[in-house]
Amino acid sequence: MTDARHLVVDPTRPDPRAIARAAAAIRRGELVAFPTETVYGLGADALDPAAVARIYEAKGRPSYNPLIVHVLDAVAARGLVTAWPPAAQRLADACWPGPVTLVLPKTPAVPDAVTAGLPAVAIRVPAHPVALALLRAAERPIAAPSANRSNELSPTTAAHVASALGDRVALILDAGPTDVGIESTVVDLTGPRPRLLRPGLVSRDELVRMIGDVAEVEATSGDASRSSPGQLERHYAPQAELRLVDDPDAGRAALGEARLAGQRAALLTYEPEIGGDPDVALLPAEPAGYARRLYAALHDLDARDYNVVYVVRPPADAAWEGIHDRLRRAAHR
C-alpha cells in the first residue's frame, strides 16, 4: 500500500479486506479504479445517476460518449436488457468472461447517462479476478470506462491511473499490469444484423465464425451520441504527436530527419532486429504481445518527453484490426 487510496492486491487472489473496502466505496457512489484484463477501469455504481455523473466529471468525458457496464455473469447481463438474441447467447458462451462487449436494448433501470441517452447499453463480463471479486462484493453492476482523462492514453497499470486522475478517484486497486492491453471488442446486437462498433483482439473473423455476418459501422462525428465507447475520432492519444509510417525503413528515415531538425523524436516498431538505439521502442511482432505492451510503451515515451513518436504500421491482416484502430485514432489530428 503506497497511500490510503492505493491498495496493492494479488491479481489472482485479492485480499477480501481490500475488495470489501472498494465495494463499500462503490455502494457509497464513489469512484474506484480497478484492473480488468483489458485496461484499468474507472468504476461507479451503474444504476446510480449521480455516481455515473462523477465518472464523466473525473474524466472530462463528453456526455455523448457512453459507458460500458461490467457485470458478474450472463444472468446479471440479461437482467439489464430487454432482448437477448441467439447471437448474444453464442457470444456470451464463447467469450465471457472476456474482452467482448455486447450492445443490447436496455431496461429502464439503466440510467440514460450511462448510454448517452440512447436506448441500448454496452455490457460485458470481465475476465480479471479482481474485477470479478469487486462485482461480487459490490452486488452492483459497475459502469467503468478506462481510468484516464478523456481521449488520452488508456492505463494498463495503477501508476498510469494515479498519474492521470490523481485525487479524482477515491480508491485504486493495484494488481499490476493488465494482460490484454487494449479495450474490448464491441458488437451491436440491437438490429437484425450484428455490427462491429469497435474492433479488439477478438477479431471480426472470429466473430463471423461465432455468429455469422458482421456489418461495418458508419462513422459518427460531432456531438451526436455514439452507440459505443471508442468511436471518437481522436482517442487513446499520448501527449506526444503520433505519426504513422508505412514500414521500418520509412520510420528510420523519419526519425533521422526529425533528429536533424532538433526534434525530440522516437520510433515505435515491432522490428526485433533493430536494437541499441535509445530512441527506438520495440514491441512484439505478434498481435497479442503488441497489444499488451502498446499503451505502456507510449506512456514510457511520454515520460521521456518526446514531442513526436513515429509508429510503424503493423501488418494489415485481420488479427491486427483492433491495434490499427487504436493507432489511427491516437494519430488523428
Image (spheres, grey):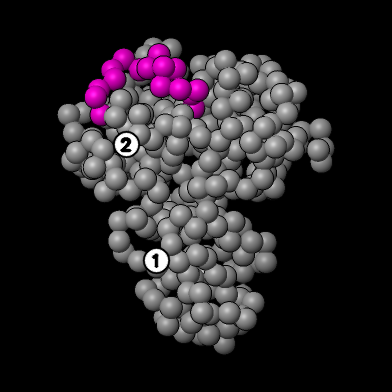
Q: Is residue 160 above or below residue 107?
A: below
Asked if residue 118 can be seen in this view, the reply is no
The residue to which callout 1 is attached is 314
> Which residue occupies the foreground of this view, 47 or 276?
276
Which residue corresponds to mark 2? 187
Q: CA gap, disc 1 to disc 2?
A: 24 Å
Question: What residue sits 69% from the left and 47% below the top?
Answer: 159
Q: State the residue at coordinates (58%, 40%).
A: 40
Judged left or right of residue 48, residue 1 is right
Q: Nearer the viewer, residue 314 or 73?
A: 73
Most extreme residue toward the bottom is 260
Earlier residue among tags 1 and 2: 2
The reply to whether the magenta stretch includes residue 190 is: no
Q: Which residues are magenta?
A: 70-87
In the figure, 163 relative to 24: above or below? below
Dot 1, how many residues are within 10 Å of its Cα: few (below 14), some (14-19), or many (20+)? many
The local crowd at label 2, few if under 14, some if 14 to 19, many if 20 or more residues have their Cα within 10 Å, is many
Q: Amino acid at mark 2?
A: Val
Q: Position of residue 221 (x, y in %)?
A: 33, 45
